[in-house]
Image: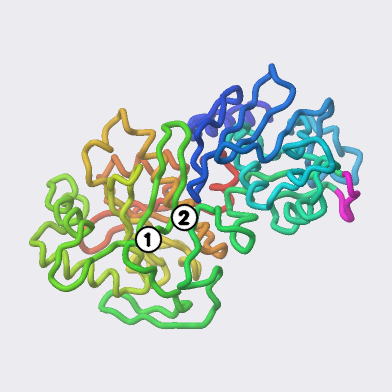
């Protein structure tokens, strides 16, 4: 058992970026809404401060006690005695001021979410972080309810005691718990076009390559709309996904110009086979934007475009017959390319891990019913297959389209959020 655990740990370490060491600061960390956060955690100062846009929003320190959560052991003789699951120091979260008469003893919900973000950035190797809320926080009941009702945290016992530790969960945090419906600071910016999850009603697709019944898909975003934004602290840059802006009439938009240039590169054409004229590419993108099952996006680092991706619904995609057991109603597929050479190469491999994992992250955030994200690159496209394996995807099968041999790479939701990949 010990050897098996060591092998699993080695696999996790190989898959994990370890973006910020435990003794480092979250410094000039850009939150999705543009606010700048700084939080310091070290072994010297007993109290750590969380600053957002220069203001201290809360403090935290470690208590002289540890806690351990093994859900299957609660209420049994093994509770708090498991040797295979680590115990972690309990963190007390305090208001920014210590006097109960000061109004700043409140912590807003969105600042509490940002504090959880800071903790899981600093202590990303912990699956859970046990916390208690200081009685000096004026709105302690509001925050405790927020953490528990949103799924950001849980207690070991039900019903829970008022002062019982809350175990913040890394997996639920990265699934977007505590964002939509609570504040607008999450990785997916607010949109007026659709709700999450989009209600279920059956629809149908019939094309020369697809005949499928499937759920009705939500309306497309506006051209140029930001779909996802996340700051990556290990490189100090922000990754953004933007819905493709085709432009109007015969005007050539910046997105279309880049798409045309990228697809006429020999390297990209080898994988995609879409080289050609500007008008050919305009017609291609028009078809994609008109297809309810395909979301075309431009990927950018710090506002500089670096690549293109198509996020598909697999149920009405021509890859569906090759998925063992068939795809789920909300399972998604990825088709990607890195257009700019400056974002390729061995020295930029960490970037590949980040943007690819972020695409998977977006798919799971966009609809909580999505259980799997898949890719189907050419079997001889070793570079993208390596990227998929580095994202902890597995090769489910190898199959043949009429025009190419492909591998089917798969990422289940549970695995993605259980591992420390973000």
What is the x, y in percent for residue 74? 86, 45
Front one among 15 and 51:
51
Marking on residue 239: none
Q: Going from the N terminus, do you reach mark 2 or mark 1 first?
A: 1
User: Which quarter of the rendered picture does the N terminus lie within?
Assistant: top right
Where is 382 relative to 375, above or below? above
What is the x, y in percent for residue 213? 44, 80
Q: Which residue is mark 2?
A: 362
Question: What's the CA distance linking mark 2 and mark 1?
Answer: 10 Å
Q: Quadrant of residue 383?
A: top left
Q: Residue 13: within the magenta?
A: no
Which segment did they paint magenta? 157-163
Identified at 12% across, 66% down, the residue is 280
Identified at 46% across, 66% down, the residue is 327
What is the x, y in percent for residue 27? 53, 30
Q: How is the image coloured?
A: rainbow
Identified at 68% across, 28% down, the residue is 48
Name the outermost residue toward the top: 44
Number of other residues with Cα within 10 Å of mark 2, as a class: few under 14, some 14 to 19, many 20 or more: some
Q: Secondary structure beneath disc 2?
A: helix
Q: Which residue is mark 1?
A: 311
Kindly check if marks 2 and 1 are in contact, taking CB atoms under 8 A apart as contact.
yes
């Amino acid at each position: 058992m010990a050897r098996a655990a060591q092998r699993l740990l080695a696999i996790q370490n190989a898959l994990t970026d370890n973006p910020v060491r435990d003794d480092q600061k979250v410094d000039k960390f850009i939150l999705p809404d543009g606010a700048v956060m700084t939080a310091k955690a070290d072994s010297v100062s007993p109290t750590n401060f969380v600053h957002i846009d220069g203001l201290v929003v809360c403090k935290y320190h470690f208590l002289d006690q540890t806690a351990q959560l093994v859900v299957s052991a609660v209420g049994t003789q093994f509770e708090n005695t498991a040797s295979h699951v680590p115990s972690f120091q309990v963190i007390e979260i305090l208001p920014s001021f210590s006097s109960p008469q000061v109004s700043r003893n409140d912590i807003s919900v969105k600042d509490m979410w940002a504090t959880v973000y800071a903790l899981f950035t600093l202590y990303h190797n912990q699956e859970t972080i046990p916390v208690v809320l200081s009685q000096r926080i004026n709105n302690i009941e509001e925050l405790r309810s927020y953490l528990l009702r949103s799924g950001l945290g849980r207690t070991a016992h039900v019903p829970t005691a008022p002062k019982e530790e809350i175990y913040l969960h890394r997996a639920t945090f990265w699934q977007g718990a505590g964002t939509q419906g609570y504040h607008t600071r999450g990785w997916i910016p607010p949109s007026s076009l659709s709700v999450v999850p989009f209600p279920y009603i059956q629809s149908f697709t019939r094309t020369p390559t697809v005949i499928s019944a499937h759920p009705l898909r939500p309306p497309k975003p506006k051209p140029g709309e930001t779909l996802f934004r996340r700051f990556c602290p290990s490189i100090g840059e922000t990754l953004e996904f933007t819905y493709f802006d085709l432009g109007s009439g015969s005007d050539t938009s910046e997105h279309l110009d880049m798409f045309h240039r990228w697809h006429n590169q020999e390297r990209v054409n080898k994988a995609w086979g879409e080289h050609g004229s500007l008008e050919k590419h305009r017609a291609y993108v028009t078809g994609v934007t008109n297809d309810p099952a395909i979301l075309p996006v431009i990927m950018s680092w710090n506002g500089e475009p670096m690549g293109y991706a198509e996020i598909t619904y697999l149920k009405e995609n021509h890859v569906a017959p090759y998925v063992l057991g068939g795809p789920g109603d909300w399972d998604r597929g990825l088709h990607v390319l890195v257009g700019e050479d400056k974002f390729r190469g061995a020295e930029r491999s960490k970037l590949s891990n980040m943007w690819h994992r972020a695409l998977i992250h977006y798919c799971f955030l966009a609809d909580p019913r999505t259980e799997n994200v898949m890719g189907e690159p050419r079997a001889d496209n070793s570079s993208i297959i390596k990227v998929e394996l580095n994202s902890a995807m597995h090769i489910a099968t190898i199959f043949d389209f009429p025009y190419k041999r492909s591998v089917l790479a798969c990422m289940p939701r549970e695995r993605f959020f259980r591992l420390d990949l973000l």
